[in-house]
Amino acid sequence: MMPIFEYKCNKCGHEMEFLEKGNSKKKHVCKKCGGSDMKKLFSGFSVGRSDSTSQGADSCPTGTCPLS
């Protein structure tokens, strides 16, 4: 599983997301202006399910079962 990291371009301020490994040293390029001076942003943590699906999580160990 690869997490999503958020970056902000220091040149134009455009924010974007990239899938990458946590220890990746890959340089990203801004999709708006082409700048390569990107700052990784601090973002919240998500476990991959919303509050609406967590109601049925007690009976569904994977958290992916459909709600009825």
Image (spheres, rainbow, N blue to C red):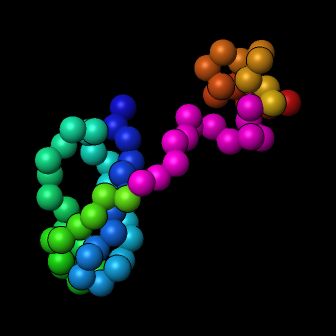
Give percent across and percent down for residue 43.
46, 52
Asked whether residue 31 appears in the rendered view, the answer is: no
Q: Quadrant of residue 8?
A: bottom left
Asked if residue 26 is positioned above or below residue 39 in the image, the reply reads: above
Asked if residue 13 is positioned above or below residue 66 in the image, the reply reads: below
Residue 48 on the magenta span: yes
Foreground pick, 57 / 66 = 57
Left or right, residue 49 beside residue 9: right
Left or right, residue 28 beside residue 19: left
Residue 38 on the magenta span: no
Asked whether residue 6 appears in the rendered view, the answer is: yes
Give percent across and percent down for residue 53.
74, 35
Give percent across and percent down for residue 48.
56, 37
Which region shows up in magenta? 42-54
Asked if residue 57 is positioned above or below residue 28 in the image, the reply reads: above
Left or right, residue 60 beside residue 7: right
Left or right, residue 41 beside residue 47: left
Residue visible at 42% across and 54% down in the picture: 42
Chief SS of the magenta region? loop
Position of the N terminus by quadrant: top left
Position of the C terminus by quadrant: top right
For the image, the number of numbered tags is: 0
Give percent across and percent down for residue 37.
18, 71
Residue that protrudes farthest toward the right in the picture: 68
Residue visible at 27% across and 45% down in the picture: 20
Residue visible at 79% across and 26% down in the picture: 56
Residue visible at 36% across and 51% down in the picture: 5
Q: Quadrant of residue 12?
A: bottom left
